[in-house]
Amino acid sequence: MPASQTETIKYFTTQETEKFLSKIVDTRDKAIFCLMYYLGLRCTELVNLKMEDLRMEDGRIFIRAAKNGVSGEYVLPKECKKLIKDYLPIREAKIRKMRLQTSTLFISNKGGTLTARQIHRLFQTYCKKARIKDETKHHPHTLRHSIAVAMANGGTPVEVVQIHLRHRKIDSTMVYFQISNQRRHEMQEQALSGAWVARI
């Protein structure tokens, strides 16, 4: 994999991800960005989620894949399940108050469907609150890259990451493992340059 291809991938470290998520207080927004991180959702996949896609009792969620990806049902992480459970009564109260008729899971403050642009603005707001200085990371797609790199670093098989990201071709997934290998090489070089290593 050419180095130039991996350099275009912007992702949060684990510490940056935790810092970013810790700055989100709003229940809906926290549910949105936790889903985007844990399930590697694209903005389009997030805004297309419907109430009927949720199977809370079984801890499952159906995702309509974007970019010719593979749609399917996925495990709903317990962190996301709790946040969605907290959000649903808020959503229901807003629907009753505004007399809305919508099956969209995440609705805007004005009662409409959230747009990718609105999610992007929200993401930038929380990046600034988390003091993430690298502005090239101020895009919601960073969360998708972040979970992929985290899974690769954790030793998850490439086929599992491919399914998780809804990639049709495994080549699209391999870039994250190249990043993981680069990081391992950097850590190895750092370890071997330490004062505790014998020198010739």
Image (tube, helix red, strand yellow):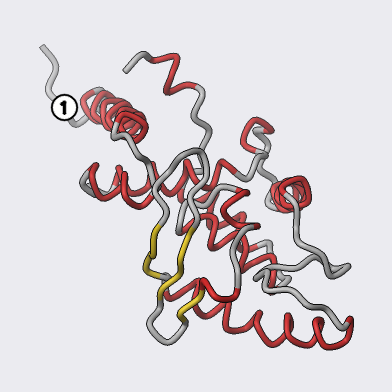
Q: Nearer the viewer, residue 153 or 44?
A: 44
Label 1 SS: loop
Residue 10: x and y in percent read 53, 33
How crowded pointer 1 is (Cα within 10 Å; few <14, some 14-19, many 20+) is rated as few
Residue sitting farthest toward the front:
101
Task: Please give left or right for residue 143 compared with residue 99 in the image.
Answer: left
Q: Residue at x 66, y 79 (%)?
A: 87
Residue 25: x and y in percent read 71, 70
> Which image quarter holds the N terminus?
top left
Q: Is the residue 52 above or below the residue 176 in the image?
A: below
Q: Looking at the picture, which amino acid does disc 1 mark?
A: Val
Task: Please give left or right for residue 12 compared with residue 44 in the image.
Answer: left
> Which image quarter holds the C terminus?
top left
Reading the image, the residue beneath label 1 is 197
Q: Nearer the viewer, residue 198 or 39?
A: 39
Q: Residue at x 62, y 36 (%)?
A: 137
Task: Please give left or right for residue 74 compared with residue 123 in the image.
Answer: left
Q: Is the residue 114 above or below the residue 191 in the image?
A: below
Q: Nearer the viewer, residue 189 or 73?
A: 73
Instruction: Give the quarter of the image for residue 78.
Output: bottom left
Q: Is the residue 16 above or below the residue 81 in the image?
A: above
Q: Residue at x 38, y 82 (%)?
A: 58
Residue 81: x and y in percent read 49, 77
Residue 20: x and y in percent read 62, 54
